């Protein structure tokens, strides 16, 4: 029997922990249950479950639930108190067709690796801030809103989002547990038929009202009205202990790679620059789906495998560097 050395033991423990984390998120976390494991794989980024579970364990007790109490986050009160000022700047953007321009094929804002799948439902956005970077276009068009959120260090990301009448976003969860998601109603249908469901809890948007939730719980959206839904969406720092903050620092650095510009005056993250290059290939592969489904599935498998390999390499580096420093 070969002797077990320390690296082998550590790797084995990491593998076991990773499998346990994926199983926990799939079968036990929250109230929502996936119809099958394939659905979980497609909608919920299980590759990030091991790191996310470290953040879950480090999250402070008051924040360990799907929908959070706004009273526990008093720093956000100033946002809600100024909702009309924020609304006016968002409506000005809407009248200038700013939301439409960011989702047009070929535009800089179109290549959004994080939210790209939402475009097919008519969803659109305008970024204000993203993990250490404030958009120049936002400073020009929304100076009051930018100034307001810049006063709150817990706000890591910000954007306006627009959901058209009759649209929806199917059940999904966000990959990174580095933050919570804040929604502030600006111009909404004010109707129970325009809602978000977070872990089997339904909330209907209202003008001037806010919601804070953990976006790594499964959530889905529907606007079954004849009016648009316009909101301010913020990423708010997850309150955690020292271990969680250490891991979260790495996560936040990864988030910077997903920076998306609104126009040519804004910076672009590396992940979205790469996504812009491979998008023509992805579009051609979708056309291939209609003519040669077998080849399409092979190419899709290769692409997804490469993506997973890159993510695993990043995670391996996150684990390997501290290990080398300690041993």
Image (cartoon, rainbow, N blue to C red):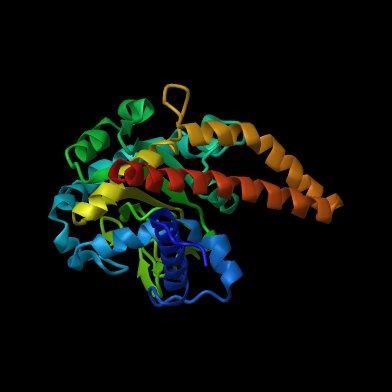
| Depth order, front residue of 52/288 | 52
Residue furthest out toward the top: 265
Tell me if 103 is positioned left or right of 324 in this view: right
Identify which residue is drawn at 41% across, 65% down.
Answer: 17
Does any portion of residue 91 appear in the rendered image?
no
Q: Position of residue 192 (x, y in %)?
A: 39, 70
Please say if 122 is above or below 133.
below
Tell me if 159 is positioned left or right of 125 in this view: left
Tell me if 11 is positioned left or right of 57 in this view: right
| Depth order, front residue of 19/223 | 19
Tell me if 188 is positioned left or right of 42 in this view: left
| Depth order, front residue of 48/88 | 48
Identify which residue is drawn at 43% across, 43% down.
Answer: 317
Q: Position of residue 28 (x, y in %)?
A: 41, 77
User: Total marks drawn?
Assistant: 0
Does any portion of residue 168 appear in the rendered image?
yes
Q: Position of residue 27 (x, y in %)?
A: 46, 76
Q: Position of residue 65 (x, y in %)?
A: 28, 69
């Amino acid at each position: 029997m070969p002797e077990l050395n320390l690296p082998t033991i550590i790797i084995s423990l990491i593998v076991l922990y990773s499998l346990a984390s994926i199983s926990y998120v799939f079968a036990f976390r929250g109230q929502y249950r996936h119809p099958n494991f394939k659905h979980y794989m497609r909608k919920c980024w299980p590759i990030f479950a091991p790191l996310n579970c470290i953040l879950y364990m480090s999250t402070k007790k008051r924040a360990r639930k799907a929908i959070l109490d706004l009273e526990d986050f008093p720093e956000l009160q100033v946002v809600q108190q100024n909702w009309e000022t924020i609304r006016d700047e968002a409506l000005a953007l809407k009248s200038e067709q700013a939301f439409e321009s960011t989702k047009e094929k070929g535009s800089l804002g179109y290549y959004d690796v994080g939210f790209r799948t939402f475009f097919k439902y008519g969803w659109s956005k305008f970024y204000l801030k993203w993990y250490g970077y404030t958009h120049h276009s936002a400073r020009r068009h929304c100076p009051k809103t930018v100034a307001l959120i810049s006063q709150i260090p817990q706000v890591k990301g910000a954007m306006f989002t627009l959901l058209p009448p009759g649209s929806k976003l199917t059940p999904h969860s966000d990959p990174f547990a580095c933050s919570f998601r804040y929604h502030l109603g600006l111009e909404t249908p004010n109707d129970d038929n325009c809602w978000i469901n977070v872990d089997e809890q339904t909330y209907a948007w209202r003008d001037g009202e806010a919601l804070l939730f953990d976006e790594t719980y499964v959530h889905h959206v529907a606007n079954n009205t004849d009016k648009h839904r316009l909101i301010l969406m913020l990423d708010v720092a997850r309150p955690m202990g020292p271990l969680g903050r250490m891991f979260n620092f790495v996560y936040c650095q990864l988030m910077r790679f997903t920076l998306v510009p609104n126009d040519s005056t804004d910076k672009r993250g590396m992940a979205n620059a790469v996504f812009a290059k491979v998008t023509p290939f992805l579009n051609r592969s979708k056309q291939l789906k209609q003519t040669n489904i077998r080849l399409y599935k092979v190419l899709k498998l290769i692409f997804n495998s490469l993506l997973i390999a890159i993510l695993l390499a990043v995670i391996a580096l996150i684990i390997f560097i501290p290990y080398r420093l300690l041993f």
